[in-house]
Amino acid sequence: MELKARCKERFEPVVQAIRQLQKEKEGLDEPLIVAIDGRCGSGKTTLGEYLEQVFDCNLFRMDDFFLRMEQRTPQRLKETGGNVDYERFEETVLRPIFQKQTVFYQPFSCRKWNLLEGYPVPYKKLNIIDCPGSDDFVGSTVTALNVTDTAIILLNGQYGVEVGTQNHFRYTEKLNKPVIFLVNQLDNEKCDYDNILEQLKEAYGSKVVPIQYPISTGPGFNALIDVLLMKKYSWKPEGGAPVIEDIPAEELEKATEMHKALVEAAAENDEGLMEKFFEQDSLSEDEMREGIRKGLVARGMFPVFCVCGGKDMGVRRLMEFLGNVVPFVSEMPKVQNTEGKEVAPDVNGPESLYFFKTSVEPHIGEVSYFKVMSGKVREGDDLLNADRGSKERIAQIYVVAGGNRVKVEELQAGDIGAAVKLKDVKTGNTLNGKDCDYKFNFIKYPNSKYSRAIKPVNEADVEKMMTILNRMREEDPTWVIEQSKELKQTLVHGQGEFHLRTLKWRLENNEKLQVKYEEPKIPYRETITKAARADYRHKKQSGGAGQFGEVHLIVEPYKEGMPVPDTYKFNGQEFKINVKGTEEVPLEWGGKLVFINSIVGGSIDARFLPAILKGIMARMEQGPLTGSYARDVRVIVYDGKMHPVDSNEISFMLAGRNAFSEAFKNAGPKILEPIYDVEVFVPSDKMGDVMGDLQGRRAMIMGMSSEKGFEKLVAKVPLKEMSSYSTALSSLTGGRASFIMKFSSYELVPTDVQDKLIKDFEAKQTEE
């Protein structure tokens, strides 16, 4: 810091010249290498150390590359620069830099005439993943947050903190990721930076600390104050490289106050820095960087930056901050594998790659994106798929920038890369090298919020459609495909109407497969509310051996742990129960069937009881009221009859099924519907509209609260009423609200709804 202060004026022209070179090379995927030459004692070393601090770059001294004694031949010393081992410099420094690898720097001691112990100098790289802002495509955001180390949450200068801001911040909370807020569109006439800053502080507290603030906003925006560097940045109308000046007198008081708040926030995250701050009331620039970095890791501070992205104003300063200050991969909490073991991003650790995304590109096919969790990966490496047990060769590896792929020979722990045309690698798979058995599954996606039944226009294309859908889910795991045996529909679940519309568009335009959406059926359940009794005799005679089976049974609603009565009474007649055996059948669709054998005197042979149970289960799978699954029923078989010749398993299966059906209908049958817990996040000015809409959907409002500047509504809503809720909510609020939902329970439907469901089912049965 002392060096920077002492030499700033002297070396400023060099700094500006390098910034100009950076500007000229912008967009080129290659390092900028600056060579410093001059006479002995001219200040080369001082200049190098100064630039190392200003640009946070790596400095290599040619003194460390002198020829050793045995290399100093007369011929070599006659060459220009003949005392320098250029071959070693090229091999150990330049080649790794151009390949974006860690340099293993081994200085040469002129005094001892030998090489000193080497040490790694890491190549500094930023991997930036751009995520969609729409809540419908939150899967991409969740994926990106899981494989990156810092989140930049962009705020539109017109609107400030929105529901989407809250949602994305909530994901960073769950994943414990550092957050930087970035206010864009400062040139918009509706932008109010001070109000946005107030919104952020109201939502996220005193941890929100501005690094910059604009002198003014609106169409005339062209300057901001950086309170970290305590400089004014201004731009010409076309943007680009800034003019960096001292802070004007009229802004100095405000800037000084904000700088002090920033220093205090940086000091709070380190005891040593805090002590120094109390002693000196200030920190050096390097100490500030360290404090901010630690604050980001601990989520103890959320810096705020300003840009006008469309005019390239403030972007370069942001990138400089990202390169110099944000935490490195090694400083972040370690990821756990499926066994709960922490895996450090160690270059020298075992080779392990986690594949977090798959995309399909024209003329190329599948592109598989991965993060190197440990070790190094090189072209030609043979790896084992820990999830699928298959071997995989990494033929080529790439780093990706938008639509461009740059081939590289090696990637290291913490790097993000891509491979093409892998044989058997799916999203979520882990590939390992020898003696490594890591598996990772740390990405958890939010529950679906919108569902549609899907089928091809041409019924012959069902198999083709399923193949394509399963492949597309590899690209976006928040598209969930379900073949419902219960509903006899193929369902696609997503995050919203737009999300599923995108899937349909891709099927029809990219895959040339015409499909149609339908309203999904509701997975109702049937149950009973009282006990009932029924008898059924199945008798069939058609020459030769006939069929005969008679079953007497009682049904009643079942609750866990309820006792079996000794007697039942129906129409004045008493039926005694003598439990011979009990079988509990947990139903895959929820609830139970409890089957009790109470047969005395051998009226039905024990060998026919499984057939009776099978018949009852068949009716449980297709309830008498609407054809929905039945649940939570206890059946007591207490009597019956059989024939020594004509009785067989099919006879008792049919008798059991029909007796159960009749008893079920007489037992106060009720239809249950799925109820979901719904949380809606809505701006306060739209609260009334949203609540009214929910009440019209048979919602039971459970609570309301304010959460970080927005209102939160909690309700229980029938699934039937949530069918198109995402579209309705977006329409009501202009896209400014969001919601989450998850299954809660099954509850009785209102009588009028039940009557309609039964009539509709009967009408459908008649048609068929």
Image: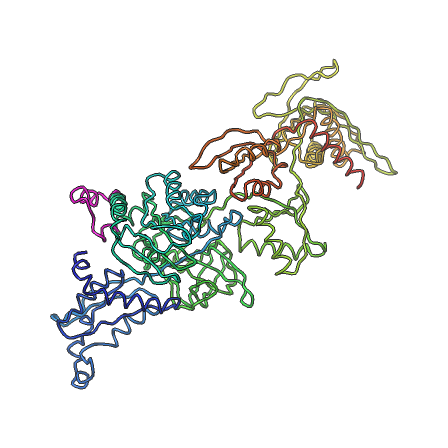
Q: Is residue 393 above or below residue 303?
A: below
Rendered image coloring scheme:
rainbow
Q: Nearer the viewer, residue 228 or 601?
A: 228
Q: Is residue 585 above or below residue 65?
A: above
- Horizontal relation, residue 587 to residue 70: left or right: right
Residue farthest to the left, as pictured: 111
Q: Quadrant of residue 666?
A: top right
Q: Is residue 532 above or below residue 169?
A: above
Q: Residue sitting at 25 percent across and 73 percent down?
A: 89
Say if the magenta span includes residue 276: yes
Q: Nearer the viewer, residue 204 or 444?
A: 204
Where is the C terminus found, in terms of image quarters?
top right
Q: Which residues are magenta?
A: 267-288
Residue farthest to the right, as pictured: 543
The image shows residue 324 at horizontal and vertical percentages of 29, 56
Q: Residue sitting at 65 percent across and 26 percent down?
A: 634
Helix, strand or loop: magenta stretch: helix
The image shows residue 674 at horizontal and vertical percentages of 61, 34
